[in-house]
Amino acid sequence: RPLLGNSAEVVREVRDPWKLGAWLRRAGFQFPPIRSGTADVPPGEWLCKPFRSAGGRGIHSWKRPEESGEDSRSVRTAHTAAARLRHASGKNYLQRRIKGVPLGAVYVAAKSRATLLGVTQQLIGCPWAGARGWWYVGSVGPVELSLPLESEFERLGECLASHFALEGLFGVDVILNADGVWTLEVNPRYTASVEIL
């Protein structure tokens, strides 16, 4: 039957972190460094992320074992995440962890143009909601944006819609911190934030 919204080809393109990251950087946006394995990973905290997941399921914090300190639990967690990445045969990748406020931007796109519908703050790993780790449990909003920040989000949506030929509703997960907006991934579909907006 006819598929409304984005084609499978568009979904594959925009969900590919290497293609997304390379294009965003060329367009002047911030995107965290990524790696396909644990060899030669620079020091710092990274996230082991599955290519196919939703709601933060399957995401684990990862540090090089020698950086994990004396805490045996941290070392065990690092080794487990590294093993999971090695044995996953291309099902996971590493993305540098960026600290800040997790936000979700929602757009509607047509004919290579996008309109920003709003931005919400994401609730991640909240114990009071029964969540752990990086699990998404909801959003609050809409978030009030300064004019420069609103312009940045508008430009991000326009550029994504134009480059990847996105259609219909789509969401963008970002981290906002003192360095600005860091795009993490694009969800080329109706997102949970739509319910808030």
Image (tube, helix red, strand yellow):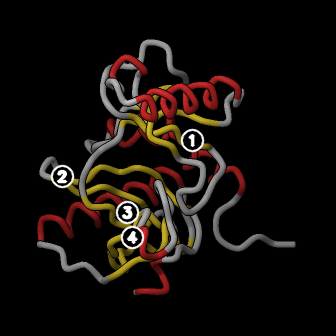
Contact, mark 3 vs mark 4 (Cβ under 8 Å):
no
Relative to 90, say whether 137 is above or below.
below
Nearer the viewer's eye, disc 3 or disc 2? 2
Badge nearest the viewer, 2 or 4: 4
- The tag earlier along the polypeptide, 2 or 4, is 4
Residue of label 1: 16
- Label 2: which secondary element: strand
Question: Label 4's element?
Answer: strand
Q: Residue furthest right?
A: 1
Question: What separation in Å lies between label 1 and label 4 (alpha carbons)?
Answer: 24 Å
**Residue assigned mark 3:** 157
Q: Are marks 3 and 2 in contact (CB under 8 Å)?
A: no
Q: Which residue is mark 4?
A: 123
Q: Say what amino acid the circle numbered 3 marks.
A: Gly
Disc 3 from disc 1: Cα separation: 17 Å
Calculate the distance from the C-alpha at mark 3 to the C-alpha at mark 4.
22 Å
Q: Earlier in the sequence, mark 3 or mark 4?
A: 4
Residue 172, image x, y percentages? 43, 61
* Circle 2 residue: 180
| Snapshot quadrant of residue 81 | top right
6 shown above or below 49 = below
Dot 3 or dot 1, earlier in sequence: 1
- Report the residue at 60% width, 49% height from top: 58
